Every structure is written in structure tokens, then in C-alpha cells.
Amino acid sequence: MSIWVDENTRVVYQGLTGSQGRFYGLRNRDYGTRVVAGTNPKKAGSDVDGIPIYATVAEAVKETAATVSCVFIPAPGVKGAVMEAAEGGVELIVVITEGVPMHDEAWFFNKLKRDFPQVRVLGPNCPGIISPGKCNIGITAGHIAEPGGPVGIVSRSGTLTYQALFELKQKGIGCTTCVGVGGDPVPGTSYIDCLQAFEADPETEAVMMIGEIGGSAEEEAADYIKTGMTKPVAAYVAGVTAPAGKKMGHAGAIVSGGKGTAKAKMEALRAAGAMVGDNPTEAGELMAGIVADLS
């Protein structure tokens, strides 16, 4: 199985008529994803390479039965796009956009939690989600992902998400689902959300977790791994040599006041029972050992 998306998932792209939305929307379709609609109120009635464009997400859902939205809207418009998607009836909103104001992220996260608790947001500032061989939503290169499991992947880093997929594929290890939760300070979906979903998925037998400096998400995940996970976890945390006070790529990737260091996160994960590699390749090797022990 996979978590949250599969071969039957139907996706509407908010921003499909833009250059980035078009590029990745069509690439996702070529992968096999059921990209059934796009939205743009100024271009309703037109199409992008045969994919119909609607004025609103609600219209797209009504006409195509889409259940997922992928957002390629510029940052100032993301808050409105997320709410339009939720009000339009989708179940999962994947926000690829980087640079969304933290105030906006906090606002729609709390608004959805209160008024649309059934709707999940992935991101912002994330690479998306891929269930290899079934569905790819976002900017992950599908050819680096080996289908079939038994490993689920969750990562804050986009680039290291791809590295994790590549490391496993090089070893002939498949992935049930790979989730990029994004590197912003207010993510819609947490490590723990993903770990819980993988723990409940009968075809995911182990989890690879990729962390990075900043915040306390990895430490919180470690607490869950210790008390709530029965499946083995291999992990890597980026940023061992990062200087304090310097943002490293993501808005949330910053060591501040001596907190959020890679060393502290690695120690917390090891104490929780996870196997932690000192680099991505070593994490992949640890996971290969775990998978060998499963068989």
C-alpha cells in the first residue's frame, strides 16, 4: 500500500497555466499521475495540453472528482489558494511554493484545523509526495524512486529527499511512499503525522527519516519513535557543521540560542532506538541492513 496517494488519486493543479505549474504538472502526468484539471479564473474554458482549466477548485472538483490539489501559486497568493482548495472539497493540499509568509502559514494551518479538520496540508516549501509507480505530485524526479516498498521515507529537506530515494534505489530497495514535509517553521504535516501513517500501513515495514537543523521537530519525532513506533527507523540529520545563527537553505533550518543542533537531534533519535547515519549514504546502508533483517 501507500499513504495518502495512489494510482487512483485525481489531482487539480492550482497554477497549471504558469511556467512551473505547467512543467511539473505535465511531468507528473507523464509519470502516470491522474492530473485531471487546472485552475485559473482568467483562463477558464481553455486547456493545458488537453487538461481542462476551471475558474475555481470547487468547479474542478465538481467536474472531475479531484481529491488532491497541488499549489504552484506565487507566495502572496498561497493563503487564498489553500483556503479555496479546502472550501472546494479536496482532501489533501500539496503546497510546493517557497517563501510563504510565516503569518500566512500559521493562519491557514489554524483555520484548517478548526474549520476543515479532514483536510491535510503538505508543505509549504516542500517537494511533494510520491508513491513510486503509482502517483507523483510535486517536483520529485520519478525515475530515482524504486517502486514496491518496504520502506517509507519522510524528509524536511527537498534535495536530501531525492538523495534518500537514490540511495535506496542503488541498493534495490523500494519505497511505498516518500513524503517531503517541507522546511518552513509552520509545516502543515509533521514527522509524527507521517510516522503514524507509516506505522499503520501494512506494506511499510521500515521508515527512513531525513532531518535537518532548526526547531524541535526531530526531537518530537524521537519521542514518538520511542513510544509509538514498532517498525525500525533509520535516520540522517543534515547540518552537523552549520554555524549558529545562519539560515541554511530553509526558513526553519537555523540553529538559534544553542538549540536545534544536528548533534542534539541525532542523540535524541539514537536514544529513541533509531539507527542514525553520519551521512546520507551511511543512512542508506543502515536501512539496507534493516531490510535484510526483515526478510
Image (cartoon, rainbow, N blue to C red):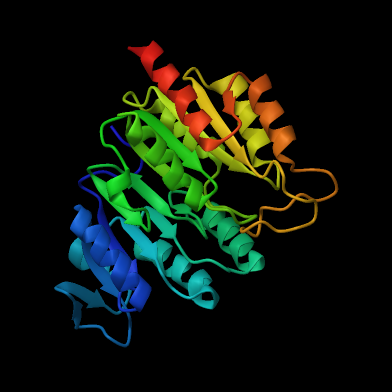
Residue 155 on image: x %, y %:
51, 43
| Image quarter hosting the N terminus | top left
Front in this rendered view, residue 246 or 29? 246
Tell me if 218 is positioned left or right of 43 in this view: right
Q: Residue furthest right?
A: 257
Instruction: Give the percent coordinates (x, y) of residue 189.
Output: 52, 47
Q: In this rendering, is residue 16 above or below 69?
A: below
Q: Residue furthest bottom?
A: 42
Q: Is residue 61 visible?
A: no
Work out whether residue 164 or residue 44 is closer to the camera in this orientation and state it.
Answer: 164
* Quadrant assignment for the C terminus: top left
Classify residue 234 as left or right of residue 133.
Answer: right
Quarter of the image where one finds residue 165: top left
Q: Given the current orientation, which residue lies at the most extreme left position?
A: 50
Residue at image point 28% right, 59% down: 11
Q: Of 88 and 141, which appears nearest the observer?
A: 141
Q: Position of residue 283 (x, y in %)?
A: 51, 30
- Image-based side of 265 in relation to 175, left or right: right
Q: Position of residue 123 (x, y in %)?
A: 50, 56
Number of labelled discs? 0
Residue 196 visible within the image:
yes
Q: Is 279 or 197 nearer to us in this picture?
A: 279
At 25% from the left edge and 83% from the top edge, which residue is drawn? 44
Q: Is residue 221 above or below residue 136?
A: above
